[in-house]
Amino acid sequence: MNPQTQQATLAGGCFWCLEAVFDDLKGVLSVESGYSGGHAENPTYKAVCTGETGHAEVVRIEFNPQELSFADLLRVFFSIHDPTTLNRQGADVGTQYRSAIFYHDETQKQAAEEIIRELTTAALWPNPIVTEVSALINYYPAEDYHQEYFANNPAQPYCAAVVAPKVAKFRKQYIERLKK
């Protein structure tokens, strides 16, 4: 990692959706799908899908804080998933689909807690935010075939029905923040 950049590790349902959105965000240098927050070492997708490893599907984002603050990254994160549903996003159900911010340092923890307070006060959702805010204790990259999944498989049925509409909504909402 470049010393001028920072990392964020976020879970908000299927990592294919998060990766596709953050790939388009100005200030993001790279996005990698992976697993975090569990107890098993080197988990596989098949193991994570059982819900027994405790891992969430996450994206690890390397970003330039001079172009994109961690707080603004989180504002995008909260706009592209439902942070009020415990262990689910839409039809994807299980602890692996939970909403979580795995902070890398105390500054990120404080920023996450502040953004959650801000959004709670704004009452954007009818239900309370249940996003987990936890220290990053482990991270494992997902298998190669999960990397850039949407970019490589846009016609795949899940991508066409779920990922593509999220990406389109993001692009409309954040047109000024898109990479050229």
Image (cartoon, rainbow, N blue to C red):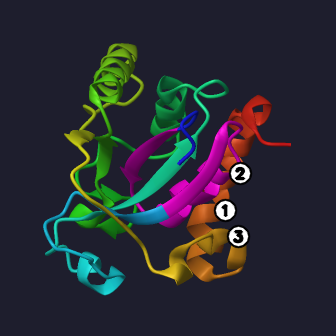
Q: Quote the CA–CA distance across marks 1 and 3.
A: 10 Å
Q: Residue 176 appears in which quarter of the rendering?
A: top right
Image point (32%, 24%), residue name? 116
Q: Point out residue 100 in the picture as x, y percentages from the top left corner.
A: 30, 46
Amino acid type at circle 3 is Ala
* Quarter containing the C terminus: top right
Residue bearing mark 2:
168
Residue bearing mark 1:
164
| Residue lying at the far bottom of the rendered structure | 46
* Region rendered in magenta: 6-32
Queried whether the magenta region covers residue 20, the answer comes back as: yes
Tell us which disc is closer to us: 2 or 3: 3
Q: Considering the numbered disc 2 on the image, is that residue within a helix, a strand or a loop?
A: helix
Q: Point out residue 163 in the picture as x, y percentages from the top left corner.
A: 59, 63
Q: Point out residue 40 in the picture as x, y percentages from the top left corner.
A: 16, 73
Q: Quote the CA–CA distance across marks 2 and 1.
A: 6 Å
Amino acid type at circle 1 is Ala
Residue bearing mark 3:
151
Q: Point out residue 101 in the picture as x, y percentages from the top left corner.
A: 32, 42
Asked whether, in this view, residue 107 is left or right of residue 20, the answer is left
Queried whether the magenta region covers residue 110, the answer comes back as: no
Asked whether, in this view, residue 64 is left or right of residue 8, the answer is right
Amino acid type at circle 2 is Ala
Image point (79%, 42%), residue name? 179
Residues at discs 2 and 1 in contact (Cβ within 8 Å): yes
Q: Nearer the viewer, residue 91 or 6?
A: 6
For the question of whether residue 28 can be seen, the reply is yes
